[in-house]
Image (spheres, grey):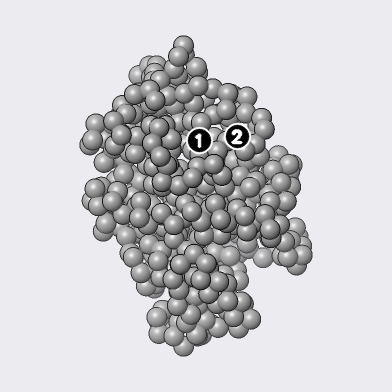
Amino acid sequence: MGKTVLVLGAGMVGTCTALHLQQRGADVTLIDRREPGEETSYGNAGLIQREAVEPYAFPRELNFVLRAALGRGAEVHWHARGLRQMAIPLIQYFHHSRPAAHAHATQSYSRLIAYAIEEHAPLMTAAQAEQLVQRDGFRFVFRTPRAFAQAVARAQRLQDQFGVRFTAEDGAALSRSEPSLRQVLAGAVHWRDPWAVQDPGALVQRYAALFAARGGRVLRGDAKTLRANGAGWSIQGEDGSIEAEQVVIALGPWSQQSLRDLGYRYPLFIKRGYHQHYPQAPGLRQPLLDAERGYVLAPMRLGLRLTTGAEFAPIDAPPTPVQLRKTEAMASELLDLGPPRPDPVWVGSRPCTADMLPVIGPAPRHRGLWFNFGHAHQGFTLGPISGRLMAEMMCGETPLVDPSPYLPQRWPG
């Protein structure tokens, strides 16, 4: 591979890609329009989800789909313009979510998830970021006995098949574990393996600082200016043109525009999400997902973070925090949240693919162009292993994970 590389996108995926290329001797420049960790990687629930071996499928229960279509519940919100723009990939997403197809995708997805903790750990140590992390898992909590029983059965299946560890807690055990809860719930599945990060943006910034301390360059630039330049590539930065032999597009939800500019048409779409902080809320010992309502409460440096489900809207649409208001009311049934911080509501976009697998590998029609995006809900979890896999392919090494399910060539166009 060429020894000079531009990595476009300084979120978790791009920053980890830059680190892994640097470790292999490449001269790497990490480029973003903002500082590292200030976009999608900033606004998640901060979970490194070792248990998330199954990608999020398109819900196929008729009652759920009808509720979402009618704007009931809080799990899903949609804009008409967003649905029109995403219609084709959403139809393909529905198709790939058939049980047999989803099970096949899970086999490939789970191979990446298996390395989530293992690949984050050495980076955290090197970046002196271990104080940001709790290592005692998180909970799915359930309000009804039926949903709890179904969740325990699923957790047992995943433990048997993929080795992810869990403990089933009845209502009394959950109340002892989380005494701040106002209600006695039906129970919880306590996933034991995930790690919880109390400031996701800060972790990306620590990784980027490690990259810079090792000699890497972190610069501002406009991905829209990416151009083939002779045998290499160039982009316009704040101080002029930046050139390299190779380029990696790791722009998360903004990757699609760059792909279109280069002539690629892949079935990509976004799911937007929101969060807000509640500094006076009582502490939780671990983050929790209210599994029957579709939101997460996660302890953060700025207070308890409430994150929402999926909104199908154009990436540039003004915020419509409908889900945030609904989930705030639901979460207040469990905890006395108190007033939110007087910050603007945060909104970000998750980069999704129709087949639920990330895109990692060489561009089919451009020499020296590489893709690393499409991680949907798990870019924060999968950044280090995706960055390693990308670097191994670029450097001609034997990959730790078979890359064939993630290659861009799986789609025409």
Mark 1: secondary structure? strand
Residue 108 is situated, as x and y percent measured from the top left of the image, at: 54, 52
Q: Residue at x 55, y 49 (%)?
A: 376
Lateral position of residue 396 relative to residue 71, left or right: left
- In the displayed structure, would residue 409 be above or below residue 301? above
Q: Residue at x 31, y 26 (%)?
A: 27
Identify the residue at the far top of this view: 230
Q: CA distance from mark 2 to mark 1?
A: 9 Å
Mark 2: secondary structure? helix
Q: Nearer the viewer, residue 371 or 145?
A: 371
Query: Would you identify the image quadrant in which residue 261 lies?
Result: top right
Q: Quadrant where the C terminus lies?
A: top right
Q: Which mark is residue 409?
A: 2
User: Mark 1 sits on what residue?
Assistant: 361
Lateral position of residue 334 relative to residue 207, left or right: right
- In the displayed structure, would residue 253 be above or below residue 225? below
Residue 38 is situated, as x and y percent measured from the top left of the image, at: 41, 43
- The kind of residue tagged 2 is Gln
Q: Residue at x 31, y 54 (%)?
A: 121
Return the disc, 2 or 1, that comes first in the chain's sequence: 1
Residue 236 is situated, as x and y percent measured from the top left of the image, at: 43, 20
Query: Would you identify the image quadrant in which residue 147 lies?
Result: bottom right
Is residue 170 visible in this depiction of the protein? Answer: yes
Q: Quadrant where the N terminus lies?
A: top left
- In the displayed structure, would residue 337 be above or below residue 124? below
Lateral position of residue 408 relative to residue 20, left or right: right
Is residue 338 visible in this depiction of the protein? Answer: no
Query: Would you identify the image quadrant in which residue 310 lies?
Result: bottom right
Q: Residue at x 49, y 75 (%)?
A: 189
